[in-house]
Image (cartoon, helix red, strand yellow):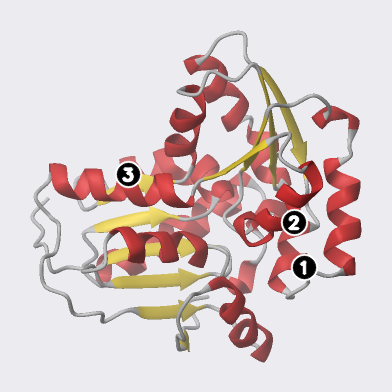
Amino acid sequence: MSHQPNQPIGIFDSGIGGLTVANAIMRVLPNEDLIYFGDTAHLPYGEKSADAIRYYALRIAKFMLERHCKMVVIACNSASSAAYRVLLEFFKGQALFVNVVDPLVEAVAARHFERVGVIATKATIQSGVYQQQLLHLQPGLDVRALATPLLVPMIEEGFVRNEVSQVVLESYLGHPDLAGIQALLLACTHYPLIKPEIEAFYQGSVEILDSTDVVALEAKRKLEAHNLLNDQRRHAHRFFISDYTPTFEQTTRIFCQEDILLEYYPMW
């Protein structure tokens, strides 16, 4: 692998939820240029088969490498669970890869909780990746995993901080499987957008953890280890989506801390 520090970082997700990770990376690595791809044509990945997700991820990673990305961040838990190892093998040596599962698991294991909950899409929960990795690092940990499939489409449609999101969240968070937890892992990059509502539900009795900041710090660590940190501030970010509707343009204002232009790229 031969890269230069001024090459961009690629970030992809099934939609625009991965912009929460992009925001964190922009804060932690303000000199880096980003290329973001939201596969809105296949939203949400959490309802797709593992084979389909791997196919999408391979094609998008190829798109990133064709644009000379030095690093690819898989800003989607479903894709991280299904495709991370495949991408490492298929594109071996062509770029650095970061997923959103490993940094969060390591951060949680370091806290030595006794009972933790995990909420995510069906694909992520069914993969068992969080349960397996948490128990590998901390045997005996009581892990309560719950699929919450309504949350991604609810957030993508802009239903946050209102009566709809309150009813849906109360239904999920009040589930018996999550009773007695000390921490809750938001194992989907969309979920940080409703973190304040989740915190309000628990009123401080449960610690709420997400992957945004820990993933940004992991990206920084890997770039530092390979001498690829950019020291020239340019801000030539580009944001692509595979299917366009005015809704996505409006919803990006919820996800992103700055105004961005979404470019339609008909990959499929």
| Nearer to us in this view, 266 or 43 | 43
Q: Position of residue 91 (x, y in %)?
A: 28, 49
Gap in angstroms between the C-alphas marked 2 and 3: 27 Å
Say whether disc 1 or disc 3 marks the residue closer to the N-terminus. 1
Query: Does residue 90 appear anywhere in the picture?
Result: no
Say whether disc 2 or disc 3 marks the residue closer to the N-terminus. 2
* Crowd rating for badge 3 (residues with CA inside 10 Å; few <14, some 14–19, many 20+): some
Residue occupying the point 80% across, 31% down: 178
| Nearer to us in this view, 254 or 237 | 254
> Residue 72 falls in which quadrant of the image?
bottom left
Q: Is residue 4 left or right of residue 179?
A: left
What amino acid is labelled 1 in the image? Arg
Are discs 2 and 1 less than 8 Å apart at CB?
yes
Q: Position of residue 28 (x, y in %)?
A: 31, 58
Element carrying mark 3: helix
Query: Does residue 16 appear anywhere in the picture?
Result: yes
Q: Is residue 226 left or right of residue 12?
A: left
Q: Is residue 235 above or below residue 9?
A: below
Element carrying mark 2: helix
Which residue matches tag 3? 218
Say whether disc 2 or disc 1 marks the residue closer to the N-terminus. 1
In front: mark 2 or mark 3?
2
In front: mark 1 or mark 3?
1
What amino acid is labelled 3 in the image? Glu
| Nearer to us in this view, 187 or 268 | 187
Are discs 1 and 3 less than 8 Å apart at CB?
no
Which residue matches tag 2? 197
Gap in angstroms between the C-alphas marked 1 and 3: 30 Å
Which residue matches tag 1? 161
Q: Is residue 241 left or right of residue 42?
A: left
